[in-house]
Amino acid sequence: MSIFKNIQPKTLIYFCLAIIICTFVVNYISIFDFKPDLNGDNVHYYALGKAIASGKGYTNIMFLEESPHSHFPPGYPLFTAFILFLFKSYTALKIANGVLFGLSILLLFFLAKRISGNLLLALLTCLLCCMQQALLRYSTIVMSEMLFTFLSLGVLYLISLLNTNRLFGKDRSRRQILYFTGIVIGLNYIYFVRTMGTSIILAVILYMLITCGQKALAWLKSKRANLDLQTIHANKRTFITNLITLCIIVASFAGAKTAWDLRNKSIGVTQSDYLKDFKKKPKGQTMETFSDWTERIQHNLTGYVGKWIPTAVISDEPAFDQKVTTKDLVKGTCIVILILLGLIALPQLKLLLFLYIGITMAVLMVWPEQYAGHRYFIGIIPLLIFLCLNGCQEALRLLTRKLPQSKTVQWLPAGGTLLIVLFFLFPQYAKALKPQQNFATYKVWNEKIADAAFVEYIYAINWCKKNLPDTARIACRKPDLFYLFSGGRKSTSFPQYATPEDLLKNFEDKNVSHVIIDRWFRHGYVTVYPMVQKYPNRFKPLIQIGQNTQKQLPTLIFQFFPETINSPGREE
């Protein structure tokens, strides 16, 4: 724009960065939530990090019996261990995720600017990401999404700077070697952060494989065309350099995966839990027939095109069970078309982004539909926003291509995109943030923001923390939440379904001393309470939380005895 004509490029970049940082800080502070999140995974990450920081290794320490952990990869727990070692605070972990998110947005700015050559587009993309409700939500809870987003954007940015044609030649620069080292380390660490991280690793490998193929063809063509020896040798060196680059990436990933597999094998784990989950249907059945898979793909395709992708780009939080209407599908299809148009219009890195986004979405098409949502593709949401804006600009450019060219017409695509962001997307993003901002004003869980049954469960945990000795062996439905809200005390779970006889033996084998029966999780009353009724002289009631009426049941805490006890009104 003419108003920026006399401004130095670096000054303009600093100005954009200042706007982005201020926008991020204001929005992050407004949604920062001091309350522990109720997602069980974030408690596991916290406990695993605490185990590593305290020198116990990669161990489950939340339960009565400690054991080596194998479900979650160790990348994010290592990060949490580092933060806990420095600050010893659960809140510090939340803030650390916010810092990662802020750094991710800065990386996105430089990546978007480099691969599009458009400073305004990079600025608008980052400002929207500063307000995107799903990204902000995961930046204030103890989950691996922000570390994954930071690493994946970092790898993409380093690849955009890398010149693989001269990486191992005599004229290579030290900076290029540093870029490549960062890419290799980043890709391997991504594998240990999230299983879905394999998508960007495979994308980079395929990208380098295609690049090697192109360089090999150029070398063979130069030989067949009988070009001068200098050109032939140059093409050969370029091919060999790219091939070495590919081999190093593949070998390092294979080594990292083998090391993790061998570690799991050493503790008796031969199959990933994710493979077991992969074949589960929403109601617990197992995928068996071809029609099962086609139905899953159809369901996921409808869900992601009609609900999850458009709400990620426009910023909204739909209900998980919200049905996709024809109108939703039309709107989602238009957004997907804009994303593809924006991808095609990119002057750089379009193939790699296509592979990364394509592989991610291909995995999500066959992933269990009960696990759908923004969380599972959160690493590419910033890229989808960027590509959609670029698609809007490219669509406007195509529409104005046949108009008489003038300065006004030349600025129509950028101006039109700016108007779309200012008058449609910004208000929508701000509206979507309101629930999070209101929710964050409550510093602790209470009846105003949570189900009364959950509040009673937390009260029961606090009662146990204050009134039971550290040696108490407590059984409850959610040991992870018990560990978090009790300040690190251990407990054990009980089967969701079991006969009174089997459950009694389970309690005896685990040397259980106390049990919480709550109404938040129905299995307390479905599974445990029948045992209490059948063996009343093995249980002593300690406290009742909540009312026992026709409409609700109370939360109960019992003391369990390994042998029958005498109590008033009871017989031996």
Image: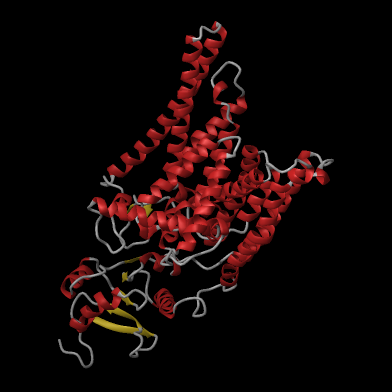
Q: Is residue 380 above or below residue 302?
A: above
| Residue 319 % position (x, y) | 46, 67
Q: Taking 418 as reference, is 477 left or right? A: left
Q: In which quarter of the image is the C terminus?
A: bottom left
Q: Which of 292 and 325 is in front in this view?
A: 325
Q: Taking 500 as reference, is 170 left or right? A: right
Looking at the picture, the colour scheme in use is secondary structure
| Residue 242 % position (x, y) | 49, 23
**At 38% from the left edge and 58% from the top edge, which residue is drawn?**
371
**At 45% from the left edge and 37% from the top edge, which residue is drawn?**
203
Q: In this view, does 299 lie above or below 12?
A: below
Q: Taking 230 as reference, is 214 left or right? A: left
| Residue 241 % position (x, y) | 50, 20
Q: In this view, does 363 lie above or below 521?
A: above
Q: Can residue 23 be seen in this view?
A: yes
Q: Can residue 57 be seen in this view?
A: no
| Residue 499 % position (x, y) | 18, 73
